[in-house]
Image (cartoon, rainbow, N blue to C red):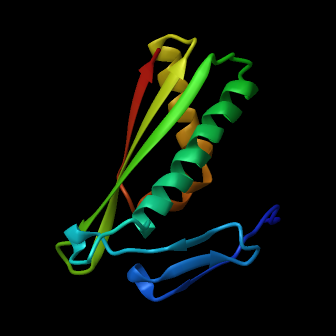
Amino acid sequence: MKTLYQTQVTAEGGRAGHVRSADGTLDLPLSLPRELGGAGGAATNPEQLFAAGYAACFENAVLHVARAKQIKLASTSVTATVGIGPREDGGFALTVSLAATLGGVDQATAEALVAAAHGVCPYSHAVRGNIDVQLNTVTR
């Protein structure tokens, strides 16, 4: 693969630590959620960061597919819901649900665009076979 872009982020202190990108644009404290035994607080966590990245990437994949098919969308948004929990065989696993809202097209067209986006999105490709991703499509 020819790499078109790469970035670098360093974490220190684990889930209750800090993350910072090499260029300094991402510089955030982390907090372990209460649900996972932490103190919680007004800081982000890896699941929120993953959800943000997946939602943005997936929305762009929808826009890319729509452009390629010459379909005009009036609006788009994607909400990623990421959960974490124990695996039966030990360790932890993630769950993902992507809710895509597309404006200006009918339900069948919206569902076809979302399915095609799931085929080209690099996040979807990266988790395929590892995380069951639920797709939900709504039109407005």
In the visual, does 115 lie left or right of 15? right
Residue 95 seen in this snapshot = yes
Residue 86 seen in this snapshot = no
Residue located 42% across and 27% down the image: 137
In the visual, does 140 lie left or right of 86? right
Q: In which quarter of the image is residue 87?
A: bottom left
Question: In front here: 47 or 64?
Answer: 47
Q: Quadrant of residue 6?
A: bottom right
Q: How many labels does the image show?
A: 0
Question: In front here: 69 or 60?
Answer: 60
Residue located 26% across and 77% down the image: 38
In the visual, does 139 lie left or right of 105? left
Toward the bottom, the furthest residue is 13
Toward the left, the furthest residue is 88
Residue 97 percent coordinates (x, y): 36, 45
Above or below — where is 103 with respect to 2? above
Above or below — where is 103 with respect to 127? above
Residue 128 percent coordinates (x, y): 47, 56
Above or below — where is 3 with respect to 17? above
Q: Quadrant of residue 125?
A: bottom right
Residue 89 percent coordinates (x, y): 20, 78
- Of the 4 image quadrants, the one containing the N terminus is bottom right
Residue located 53% across and 42% down the image: 118
Toward the front, the furthest residue is 42
